[in-house]
């Protein structure tokens, strides 16, 4: 039987065409899209397409859109073998990370892809990304189960675990990278899957979609010379629940007394502060230097090797799902839930 794949179009460059006269980008209709990718009608899979009511640039993506994406997967879950979500590249890593937490008990592939050049442009990367993403969404193991039953991002020959991925390049076709986790597959002449790195569910349970997300989170990026007022403004934001503190190197921060006092007082008020290194590769280790041990003493939690995108999405998901249980959130934050962190 031919595998069935559902394409979910949300917008972004991959869903745009250039207007003839001005060259400006506008959303492609479904028929225009199929016109530029005639292979969609010829592929060895059964492909159907649904689209968001209006295509959006991913800079406009809001957590409510993550809920729409998750619900689109849920309402078609039993009818398809896999899902491909077409999404703008700018915030794809956020959306894909969020869905990795929201789609509980996932046993089918959900592959995000996009492109740097619009569909229909001669050198566009859209067709290759799209067709290979579909092939991955349809791929099966020998026992008939899904080859990659995870939320992933496919881009320029590489399949990455979604919650390990960051947009790294605004120009090159190879726009995404996973700095702390080896790609799950490479696509050349053949698609080579790294099966030992892919997460396979041990038991099959019904899909459970978590749609409660709490947006009361913030990012505080340290830099030499940061002022007390800037730190105070962020940490005293009304209703704030959690802060991703972007630190230096292995998780180090300047030793200003006022900084520790402010962090300690925010933590005493119940705000979770989690340490994320500004480095792309490597992990936070707050045992290494005095300047990070002080953070540990103040009650700052380790973000280990999580991406900022995964941390933000995980915090929104945890506070949405366990609104009254900060202790449980602290435990889950520092454990891998869907392969988003490694503790050495
Ligand atoms: N601004 C576009 C978006 O993220 C860029 C892209 O798709 O590559 O929607």
Image (tube, grey):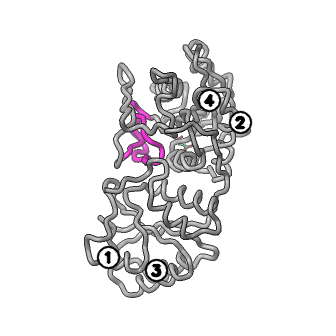
Local crowd at mark 1 within 10 Å, few (<14), some, or many (≥20)?
some
Question: Of marks 1 and 2, which one's residue comes earlier in the chain?
Answer: 2
Q: Position of residue 51 (x, y in %)?
A: 69, 33
Above or below, 80 against 262 in this view is: above
**Left or right of 87 in this view: 308:** left
Question: Of marks 2 and 3, which one's residue comes earlier in the chain?
Answer: 2
Local crowd at mark 4 within 10 Å, few (<14), some, or many (≥20)?
many
Question: Of marks 1 and 4, which one's residue comes earlier in the chain?
Answer: 4
In whole angstroms, how far apart are the C-alphas of marks 4 and 2? 13 Å
What SS does tag 4 mark? Answer: strand
- At 34% across and 67% down in the image, what residue appears? 251
Tag of residue 75: 2
Local crowd at mark 2 within 10 Å, few (<14), some, or many (≥20)?
few
Magenta span has 176? yes
Residue tagged 3: 263
Picture quadrant of residue 40? top right
Label 1 with label 2: CB-CB less than 8 Å: no
Between residue 247 and residue 142, name the one nearer to us. 142
Q: Which residues are magenta?
A: 155-178
- At 69% across and 42% down in the image, what residue appears? 71
Question: Which image quarter is the C terminus in?
Answer: bottom left
């Amino acid at each position: 039987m031919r595998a069935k794949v559902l394409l979910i179009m949300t917008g972004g460059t991959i869903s745009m065409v250039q207007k003839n006269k001005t060259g400006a980008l506008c959303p492609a209709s479904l028929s225009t899209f199929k016109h530029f990718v005639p292979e969609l009608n010829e592929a060895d899979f059964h492909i159907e397409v649904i689209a968001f009511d209006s295509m959006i640039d991913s800079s406009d993506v809001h957590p409510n859109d993550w809920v729409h994406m998750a619900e689109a997967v849920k309402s078609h879950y039993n009818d398809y073998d896999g899902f491909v979500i077409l999404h703008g590249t700018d915030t794809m890593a956020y959306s894909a990370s969020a869905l990795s937490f929201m789609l509980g008990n996932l046993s089918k592939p959900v592959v995000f892809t996009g492109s740097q050049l619009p569909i229909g442009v001669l050198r566009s990367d859209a067709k290759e990304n799209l067709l290979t993403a579909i092939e991955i969404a349809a791929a099966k193991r020998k026992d008939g189960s899904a080859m990659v039953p995870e939320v992933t991002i496919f881009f320029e020959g590489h399949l990455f675990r979604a919650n390990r991925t960051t947009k790294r390049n605004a120009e090159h076709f190879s726009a995404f990278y996973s700095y702390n986790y080896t790609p799950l597959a490479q696509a050349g002449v053949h698609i080579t899957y790294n099966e030992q790195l892919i997460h396979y569910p041990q038991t099959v349970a019904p899909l459970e979609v978590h749609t409660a997300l709490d947006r009361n989170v913030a990012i505080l990026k340290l830099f030499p010379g940061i002022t007390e007022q800037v730190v105070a403004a962020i940490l005293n934001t009304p209703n704030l629940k959690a802060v991703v503190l972007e630190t230096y190197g292995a998780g180090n921060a300047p030793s200003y007394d006022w900084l520790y006092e402010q962090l300690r007082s925010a933590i005493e008020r119940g705000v979770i502060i989690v340490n994320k290194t500004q480095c792309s590769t490597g992990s936070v280790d707050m045992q290494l230097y005095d300047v990070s041990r002080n953070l540990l003493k103040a009650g700052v939690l380790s973000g280990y090797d999580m991406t900022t995108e995964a941390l933000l999405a995980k915090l929104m998901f945890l506070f949405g799902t366990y609104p009254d249980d900060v202790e449980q959130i602290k435990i889950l934050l520092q454990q891998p839930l869907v392969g988003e962190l490694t503790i050495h």
